Amino acid sequence: MMAGLVKKIEINCDMGEGFGRWKMGPDEELIKYIDVANVACGFHAGDPTLMLKTVRMAKAHNVKVGAHPGLQDLFGFGRRRIEVDPEDMYASILYQVGALKAFLEAEGVPLNHIKPHGELFFYMQRDAVIMDAVLRAAAVYKVPVYACKNETQKEMCAKYGLPFQEELYVDIDYNAQGDLVPVAKSKKATPEIIYNRVLACALKDERDHNEQGVLKVGFEGQPFSICIHSDMPTALDNAKAARKAVGEANAKLFSK
């Protein structure tokens, strides 16, 4: 049976994004402030031991776990443009999610969702054939797909019978058209800015953009998921600020 969408505002965070001896993000502390972990599956980051450790840590903290597949680019952390044949892309998503699912099954934890990482998300927005390949693979696992709110992906998820969980990003920028801006081109967000962004979206359906204006997000009072990046310099303080704002917003809007 396929899982549904969120009933109140939640926080999801990209985790397990180290590799071997290289650590990325304060995962052991971040896990205390989030609801959902997006676990790297070995292509842009992550390795078997780290994947197992992250699944066990999430289980211990009652945090849901989703797959965070990316482009095969450890050196660039999955944030560089790489051209991939659509059938290779389909196979790579099956492969990455399948690897995480094995660890989840070993620990008795369900797969909550699939969330494409970094440049893979932007590649999907540019290329409908690639988007189709990714979502066709996701449909095998019958779980929701997470991504920044956008109508194209929502429509294609519907084609494959996949719930589409729309996200708000609070630690990177949007442009004036409402499109997400890559990490490398975004200005650093302070915990105070993140707190204010969460409340503005929850209470007024607004988000600031990078041309000093404000745009309507389009959640229209519905609950949504908030993404926090674990590789940001202030990731832990960002998560604490988001958690405080989410607690206040949920108490006001979704307490029943």
Image: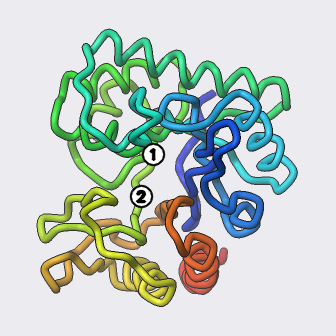
Amino acid type of the residue that numbered disc 1 sits on in the rendered structure: Tyr
Q: Give percent across and percent down for residue 108.
A: 84, 31
Q: Which mark is residue 167?
A: 2
Q: Nearer the viewer, residue 94 or 46?
A: 46
Total numbered circles: 2
Q: Nearer the viewer, residue 253 or 73?
A: 73
Q: Give percent across and percent down for residue 206.
A: 29, 79
Quadrant where the C terminus sits is bottom right
The answer to the question of whether label 1 and label 2 lie on touching residues, with beta carbons closer than 8 A, is: yes
Q: Give percent across and percent down for residue 96.
A: 54, 23
Q: Which mark is residue 185?
A: none
SS at mark 1 in the image: strand
Amino acid type of the residue that numbered disc 2 sits on in the rendered structure: Glu
Q: CA distance from mark 1 to mark 2?
A: 7 Å
Residue at image position (57%, 70%) is: 235
Q: Which mark is residue 146?
A: 1
Q: In the shown orientation, is residue 177 left or right of residue 231?
A: left
**Up/down of 176 relative to 164, above or below:** below
Q: Nearer the viewer, residue 71 or 134?
A: 71
Residue at image position (60%, 53%) is: 24
Q: Give percent across and percent down for residue 153.
A: 28, 40
SS at mark 2 in the image: strand
Quadrant where the N terminus sits is top right
Q: In the shown orientation, is residue 223 left or right of residue 246?
A: left
